[in-house]
Amino acid sequence: MDLNETSEESAFRAEARAWLEANVPASPLPSFDTEEGFAQHRVWEKKLYEGGWSAVSWPVEYGGRNADYIKWLIFEEEYYRAGAPGRVNQNGIFLLGPTIMEVGTEEQKAKFLPSMASSEIVWGQAWSEPNAGSDLAGIRSKATRDGDDWILNGQKIWASRAVWADWCFGIFRTDPTADRHRGLTFILCPLDLPGITVRPIAQLDGDTGFAEIFFDDVRVPVANTLGEENKGWNVAMATAGFERGVSLRSPARFSEAVNRLIHLWRTYADPTDTALSDAVTDVWMQAEGYRLHTYQTVTGMLEGRPIGAEASLNKIFWSEMDVRIHEIALQILGPEAERMEGPFERWVDGFLFSLSGPIYAGTNEIQRNIIADRVLQLPKGM
Ligand SMILES: Cc1cc2nc3c(=O)[nH]c(=O)nc-3n(C[C@H](O)[C@H](O)[C@H](O)COP(=O)(O)OP(=O)(O)OC[C@H]3O[C@@H](n4cnc5c(N)ncnc54)[C@H](O)[C@@H]3O)c2cc1C
C-alpha cells in the first residue's frame, strides 16, 4: 500500500474539489426522507451526473469515469469535505449498480445503469419481510412463472426511500420445494405497477424514511430477473458484500464527522475534562484507523484480492464508531443537545440515525456470527 498520491491522483483530487466547490448547494438540502427533500436530492444527483461525478468508478459508457477504487476514496474525501448532500440513490449506485455489473446481461447493463447514474430512476431495496430480517432466507414473498412474466405476491418492509423511489430490487421465492437458500430469485420491479401498494412508515424523527411494499398479483417480465432463476441468494450475497464492504460507507463519512466533533469539542467542551479529550482522541484514532484499513483493503482489491467475509468486520467497526462519535457529541453538548434546532440539530439527527447502523446492512450480531464461522472458523455453538 502506497499512501503517497500519484500526480494523476492529485490532479483528480483537485478537479473534484474545484467542481464540488463550485456546485455544492450553499445550504443543506431538506432531509431526503421528506417529499421535498427527496425531489431536491434527485436534482442534485442529476447535476452530479452531468458533471461526471455521480458514479466515478463506473465505466464511462454507463455514466462513470472509470476511476479506480483509490480515486473513488479520494472523491469521497472531497465529497464529505465539501459538505455535499447525502446520496438519495445509494441503494442503486452503491449496491445494485455493482451487482448488475457483476451478474447482469449486457441488455440489463445498458437499460438500468445510465438511468441509475443520473438518478432518473431511484432504487429501493425490497428484501426484508416482517418475519425475515436477519433470517433473510426465510422470506415468503413469492414469484410464480406465467409465460414470460413473473406474478409477484407478498409483503416487504423497511425499504429505505421506497416512498418516493421509482423501482425496487427484491428477492422472491420461486421454488417453494427447494432448500431455503436455493429457491430464491432476484427480481427488478417498477414501483408504480398495478397491484403494488407502498405504505410509508414514520421513523423516530417523524420522517417517512421507510416503506412497506405490498405485492398483489404484480406482473413483471421474466427479463427483469437479475442472475439465474433460483440462484437469487448468490446474487443477494454479492449485493450484501458491497453493502458491508467498502462501497456503502466510505471512511470519509466518519473522518468528516470526527472533524466536526473536534470542532465541537474545541468550541464547547471543558478543556480540563481529560476523560472527554481522551474520548475524542480515541474516536479520531478509530476514524483514522478505518481510513488506513480501507486503503489497505482497496489496494488488495486492485491487486485482485476480493473482499470476502471480512466485510463483516468493516460493518461492525464503522457502525459502532458512528454511535460513539455521536454519543461523545451529545456528552459535550449536555442538555443543549435536547434543542432540536440550530447547529445542534444535525448532531441529534445523526445520533438517532447512528443507532440504526448496528441494525441495517445485517445486524452486528449476525456479522459476529459470520466472522466466527467464516473468518475465524470457530466451531458452531452448542
Ligand atoms: C435504517 C435502516 C434501513 C433499512 N433499510 C432497509 C432496506 O432498504 N431494505 C430492506 O430490505 N431492509 C432494510 N432494513 C431492514 C434491516 O435489514 C433489518 O432490520 C435487519 O436485517 C434485522 O432484521 P429484523 O429487523 O427483522 O430483526 P430480527 O432479525 O428480528 O432481529 C432481532 C434481534 O435479534 C438478533 N438476532 C436475530 N437472529 C440472530 C442470530 N441468529 N444470532 C444472534 N442474534 C440474532 C438480531 O441481531 C437483532 O438484535 C433497514 C433497517 C434499518 C434500521
Image (cartoon, rainbow, N blue to C red):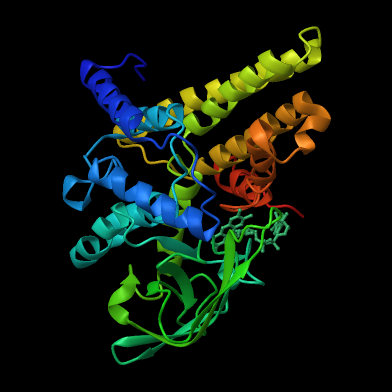
Q: Residue at x 34, y 56 (%)?
A: 119
Residue 20 on image: x %, y %: 34, 31
Residue 206 on image: x %, y %: 68, 57
Q: Residue at x 28, y 21 (%)?
A: 14
373 vs 48, left or right, is right
Residue 85 on image: x %, y %: 45, 41
The residue closer to the viewer here, 14 or 294, is: 14
Residue 273 on image: x %, y %: 81, 11
Query: Would residue 89 be seen by someone viewing this image from the given angle?
Result: no
Q: Residue at x 27, y 63 (%)?
A: 112
The answer to whether residue 213 is above or below residue 22 is below
The answer to whether residue 47 is above or below residue 292 is below
Question: In the picture, residue 10 is in which quadrant?
Answer: top left
Tell how many labels.
0
Q: Quadrant of the N terminus?
A: top left
The answer to whether residue 74 is above or below residue 128 is above
Query: Would residue 149 be seen by someone viewing this image from the given angle?
Result: yes
The answer to whether residue 263 is above or below residue 272 is below
Quadrant holding ligand 1? bottom right
Question: In the picture, residue 18 is in which quadrant?
Answer: top left
Q: Quadrant of the C terminus?
A: bottom right
The residue positioned farthest toward the top in the image shown: 272
